[in-house]
Image (tube, helix red, strand yellow):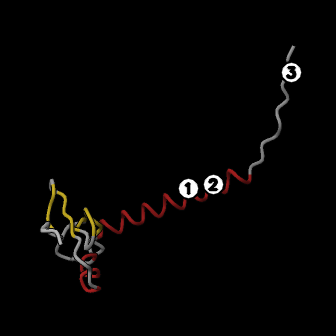
Amino acid sequence: MSDSPESGELLGIPYNFERPSLGRMLSAYWQPDEGMLVEKPFGVGYTLNLANWRSWLVVGLAGALFYQQERGDEDDESEEEEPVEVLVD
């Protein structure tokens, strides 16, 4: 096996490739004493801390934008364009 560490930091970005346990997965997303972003329990980078109210604003905004996009796609499909007559001399 390789001697490289399974968790640490590279260029200021955290990584963790240790096999995650259920407790570690659940506690990673709910940390009341931390900020909006916390280290991912598995993988590279950060994730949202659901104990922080700002994270819920981000989730709500993403949901609203997704809803608006899906609703806009439905409106585009329902509008039928009429054919345009082109006269060439």
Instruction: Say what amino acid the circle numbered 3 marks.
Output: Leu
Q: Quadrant of residue 46?
A: bottom left
Residue beneath the point at 55% across and 55% down: 69
- Left or right: residue 52 compared with residue 82: left
Identify the secondary structure beneath mark 2: helix
Q: CA distance from mark 3 to mark 2?
A: 32 Å
Q: Quadrant of residue 37?
A: bottom left
- Left or right: residue 65 compared with residue 42: right
Q: CA distance from mark 2 to mark 1?
A: 6 Å
Which residue is situated farthest in the top direction here?
Answer: 89
Instruction: Say what amino acid the circle numbered 1 marks.
Output: Gln
For marks 3 and 2 on the same chain, the one whose residue lies earlier in the sequence = 2
The disc label shown at residue 6, or none: none
Circles 2 and 1: CB atoms closer than 8 Å: yes
Residue beneath the point at 16% across and 57% down: 10
Q: Which residue is mark 2?
A: 73
Identify the secondary structure beneath mark 1: helix
Instruction: Say what amino acid the circle numbered 2 marks.
Output: Asp
Give how far across and how far down residue 34 sits, in percent. 18, 71
Q: Which residue is mark 3?
A: 87
Q: Which residue is mark 1?
A: 69
